[in-house]
Amino acid sequence: MNDTTLNDAPIKIFTGCASQELSGKIAESYGSALGKCSILRFSDGEFQPAYDESVRGAVVFIIQSTFPPAEHLFELLLMVDAAKRASASRVVAVIPYFGYARQDRKDRPRCALGAKLVANLLCAAGVDRVISMDLHADPIQGFFDVPVDHLHASPIFVPYLKSLNLENLVIAAPDVGGTKRANAYSRFLKVEMAICYKLRKKANEVSEMKVIGDVAGKDVVIVDDMVDTAGTITKAAELMCEMGANTVRVACTHAVLSGPAYDRINKSPITEMIVSDTIPLIVPHPKIKVLSIADLLAEVIQKVYTHQSISDTFI
């Protein structure tokens, strides 16, 4: 894919510690090797990333998901700063999973707006562009003062769902906030849609849930941007099975899977959970199918580098 004839500045792709496996796949798909970088670690835990090759005048792409611990985010900020101070012509942060995205609004008094703060930090560090995937909320793009390419995992999920040949397919949203995403899938696949209505007493705990739509005798696929503790999706799957669904699958971009998630998935009636590799799985699970976004991100990186439109990457 590498085509320097369309761009005077060479391209260099680097990775942070959080996304090394995915970054390797992206570089391989792009047709180049990952750039050389290292981290100096001090005795007290402080660390300092550095580039082990020149980036002067280069277009630098830094791939790093920002899931916990917070060092992943700080490492990305330091790598952006180091590239700018080393005279890179442009620095693009490729953030497959954008952490702190759930803090996108003030939903209670005196709380932090984490997503906006992270955007400010990245801009202050000197990033020129951001590429991310399935942000928790679309308005997060507006938190940045630089261009944001907001990608979706649908180009990898839709072909897989088609390959399953489910004759009675229904797409479901796990909550009212996910109806836009579910509607996009249902319209493209030309199938019906269902919506789960949920009430929360507190974060990560669903107190009540109802299903709007007909799922009896159907093969349901719940689509979502992320699964954290898996409380919502397992509760939704149980409710849909009680309402007569044949099978229930889940398609989520970001497999956060913290706390009791693995145990809940294991005990649930979910047939299969389809996820991307924006976040590496802690341990493999027989119900979890991982589809790689490497080819998609490599294509977008090439188009951003050569100033081409990325519109045709959307489904």
Image (cartoon, rainbow, N blue to C red):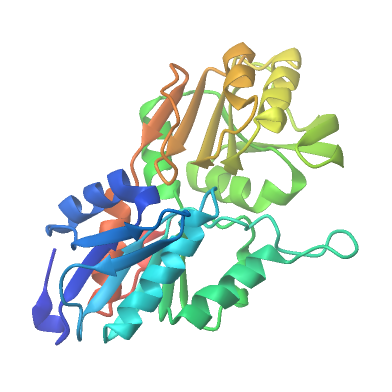
Residue 182 location (% of width, % of height): 61, 45
Does any portion of residue 269 appear in the rendered image? yes
Q: Tell me which residue sits at (73%, 50%) in the image.
A: 177
Residue 119 location (% of width, % of height): 57, 72
Position of the C terminus, as image quadrant, is: bottom left
Does any portion of residue 151 appear in the rendered image? no
Q: Is residue 137 above or below residue 143?
A: above
Left-right relation of 120 to 73: right
Q: Tell me which residue sits at (76%, 46%) in the image.
A: 176
Q: Tell me which residue sits at (31%, 59%) in the image.
A: 39
Nearer the observer, 222 or 23: 23
Nearer the observer, 244 or 35: 35
Q: Residue furthest front?
A: 43
Q: Is residue 89 above or below residue 314?
A: below
Nearer the observer, 272 or 79: 79
Toward which corner of the image does residue 114 lie, by quadrant?
A: bottom right
Toward which corner of the image does residue 226 lie, by quadrant?
A: top right
Residue 167 location (% of width, % of height): 49, 23
Left-right relation of 299 to 136: left
Left-right relation of 106 to 27: right
Q: Is residue 38 above or below residue 230?
A: below
Q: Tell me which residue sits at (53%, 39%) in the image.
A: 252
Residue 291 location (% of width, % of height): 36, 37
Q: Residue furthest left?
A: 5
